[in-house]
Amino acid sequence: MHSRVSEHFVLIVLVAFIGTINPSGGDLGVLVPLEHAVLAHSATDERRTEIFARYSLIGALATAAGSLAAAFARSARRRRQHETRRPSG
């Protein structure tokens, strides 16, 4: 597997860069089918379901953590704005 990655490194880097550009309005990038294909190819038949379950769980947890972090940041910004508007006295 290592030799395949090194043989196609430029192609992988190109796909990784292009995959960050999402032409659709959805939340899934163009790399998702590639990720699924790599997972399916690299996992044995016996472990394929487990690998996809972990992949999905980790993705959902990362999404939730990002949403929570964004909410905390917005809340902190609003709190600072509210505190600066109060008249001192």
Image (cartoon, grey):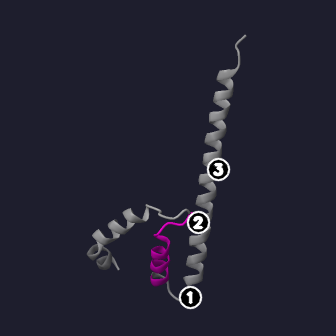
Quarter assignment of residue 87: top right
Q: Residues within 10 Å of mark 3 (few under 14, many from 20)?
A: few
Residue placed at 28% from the left, 69% from the top?
10
**As shown in the figure, which amino acid type bears the numbered disc 2?**
Ile
Q: Earlier in the sequence, mark 1 or mark 2?
A: 1
Quarter assignment of residue 86: top right
Classify 67 as above or below 27: above
Name the secondary structure under disc 1: loop
- Pick the front one: 4 or 83: 83
Name the secondary structure under disc 2: helix
Q: Which residues are magenta?
A: 26-41
Determine whether, in the image, residue 3 is placed left or right of residue 82: left
Classify 25 as above or below 70: below
* Contact (Cβ within 8 Å) of mark 3 with mark 2: no
Which quarter of the rendering shows the N terminus?
Answer: bottom left
Report the disc number at residue 58.
2
Label 1, label 2: how far apart the Cα atoms are: 20 Å
The secondary structure making up most of the magenta span is: helix
Look at mark 3 in the image and give the residue it sits on. 68
Which quarter of the rendering shows the C terminus?
Answer: top right
